[in-house]
Amino acid sequence: SQKIEQNSEALNIQEGKTATLTCNYTNYSPAYLQWYRQDPGRGPVFLLLIRENEKEKRKERLKVTFDTTLKQSLFHITASQPADSATYLCAPYNNDMRFGAGTRLTVKP
Amino acid sequence: NAGVTQTPKFRVLKTGQSMTLLCAQDMNHEYMYWYRQDPGMGLRLIHYSVGEGTTAKGEVPDGYNVSRLKKQNFLLGLESAAPSQTSVYFCASNIGQYTEAFFGQGTRLTVV
């Protein structure tokens, strides 16, 4: 069956460091993959979309990679700030939009 | 431009009662989705629609029904609520594939 796994439930890093979040999928051939941010009590908010023929996408301090051979996407936040603390969700798209369980990132000052 | 609006925001139901959650979007989006979110489980897709008059099952459709009679509205129904359906429900919409989705603010449903 299709499975989406995000590397860890929680990730704690120091302000200024780079946060790297992982999304792995199995029994999937997604045409594209999205990353969303969710704050407590709120709905997810779109961050980035990367297509299967794209290796990397950047937006300000965010970078996403997509490796269809490894069936993996990496999401990086450089120069992290406490305001980046949130849960990050990946969503590989294959006929419908399903999400991983998310990684809760905490950036400590 | 309100985006995606969910009604109601909170609801408490007794086991066996029925109710309908309404999702309305004013962005002329074709695709709409219903999810439930439980602690540690992430968002799980219940049903979705790729256009007016169409619906399809997601990961966890049992116990729920949906209708998309108008393009702007996507209704999620619980015919006989069970405590296992206690959750936060999110609706989302997008224009179609390869586009970002917009989410509503969520509906917190408790079944006692």
Image: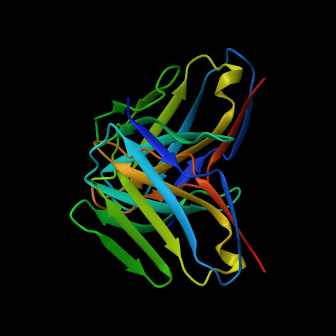
Q: Give the residue at x 29% y 44%.
A: A94
Up/down of A64 relative to B94, above or below: below
Outermost residue toward the left?
Answer: A53
Q: Give the residue at x 40% y 32%.
A: B58
Up/down of B73 relative to B12, above or below: below
Q: Left or right? Give the position of A39 relative to B59.
A: right
Up/down of B51 relative to A90, above or below: above
Task: Residue A44 in the image: state x and y as whole percent.
Answer: 55, 58
In this view, the residue in front, A61 or B68, is A61
The image quadrant of residue A34 is bottom left
Display colour scheme = rainbow
In this view, the residue in front, A92 or A41, is A92
In this view, the residue in front, B34 or B38, is B38
In this view, the residue in front, A37 or B73, is A37
Q: Left or right? Give the position of B15 relative to A49.
A: right
Q: Quadrant of the N terminus of chain A?
A: top left
Task: Residue A77 in the image: state x and y as whole percent.
Answer: 54, 75
Q: Left or right? Give the position of A81 relative to A63.
A: right
Q: Give the residue at x 28% y 35%.
A: B54
Up/down of B55 relative to A23, above or below: above
Task: Residue B72 in the image: state x and y as whole percent.
Answer: 38, 50
Task: Residue B53 in the image: state x and y as whole percent.
Answer: 28, 35
Q: Quadrant of the C terminus of chain A?
A: bottom right
